[in-house]
Image (tube, helix red, strand yellow):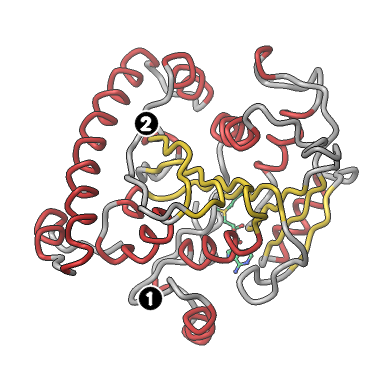
Amino acid sequence: MSDANGYVPTPEPVANLAASTAFGAERPGHVGDDDRRGRLLLPGLGTGNLYDAVHRYCTNGDGWSTARKFDYPLPECVAVETNSELVDEFEAGHPDAEIDVHHADFLLDPPEGEFDWVLANPPFVCYQDIDAAKRDQYRERFRIAQGQFDMFVPFFEQSMRLLKPGGTLLFILPLPALLVPAFEPFRKELRDHFIEPIFYLPPETFAEKVETVMVGVEKQPHSRGHHLWLEALRGWESREILSGLGVDDVDDAVDRYYDEHAFTEEMLKWKDDRERRNQDGGRQSGLEAFTGGTSP
Ligand SMILES: C[S@@+](CC[C@H](N)C(=O)[O-])C[C@H]1O[C@@H](n2cnc3c(N)ncnc32)[C@H](O)[C@@H]1O
């Protein structure tokens, strides 16, 4: 259940997918030519489900899938969490965790240094629910925190700042981030980098059945601006995730997932083409008509 800070636990099968997608073929404990230990940032740590997935990814014998079970050193992990109760809960449940946890507001008091990866299920907190004093501070500090921004927007900008050039960010985001006119500044920032996969996640991922996507970005300027497109999970992945989420009829849920993906992908393609075409002229009326002018 979501709270005022947007705490919603990331389900284990989706956290596993996030870790394996973020690292790809890389060994997080050894990166670059000098074989140094990579640095991973986990903003909005919550109770640590993404940290647990990274641990499973790196630890032999404790993995979730034989095909993706490795024996790697952990990257150097740094996390930020604003809610002291969640920090306490994480620490009580992870007495031996190799992670440096900062109890702080990630947007106002970020950790030092640069990171090879940022992995987050950032808070989805709509503008009206963000503390008014903080909202003003966020607006002053973040270029894309414009209009009725959601908390995930400054989280994204802060994370991109802290990412090394060439580093990878992986965020779980609400589907409206890709569709709703209010988030156009966020999409502009996204298109200005090299977009890795955007996966459509099964609507069953979160108990509240909010549609979500997993967005990967490599920090590399992309001068012409990327298209946004939506990939479907591979057959075995959607099956593994849906059964890991405990849905009753997995076959039926997998069929529904591909139908929903196809519909959403068509809608995104249409809107993305229009938004890119309209960018110069600044005409938003078509987009608003399509979404009914909805805001999150
Ligand atoms: C969607 S939850 C992430 C849950 C986490 N992945 C897990 O499975 O436990 C978002 C988290 O961001 C935290 N958060 C919200 N605003 C924050 C801020 N300004 N700085 C740091 N953490 C924040 C919330 O307290 C919440 O734990």
Determine whether the residue tagged by mark 2 lies in a helix, strand or loop.
Answer: loop
- Residue ID at (76%, 51%): 90
Q: Amino acid at mark 1?
A: Gln
Quadrant of the rendered image containing residue 111: bottom right
Residue at which label 2 appears: 231
Q: Between disc 1 and disc 2, whose residue precedes? A: 1
Question: Image height check: is 246 above or below 115?
Answer: above
Residue 268 image offset from top left, x and y in percent: 24, 43
Q: Secondary structure at mark 1?
A: loop
Residue 32 image label: none
Q: Tell me where residue 109 appears, x and y as whole percent.
A: 69, 74
For this orientation, the residue located farthest to the front is 223
In the rendered image, residue 120, in percent from the top left (x then y), is placed at 59, 50
Residue, x 50% and y 84% (percent of image)?
A: 140
The correct choice, above or below, for 183 with respect to 15 in the image is below
Residue 278, quarter of picture: bottom left
- Asked which quadrant contains residue 53, the reply is top right
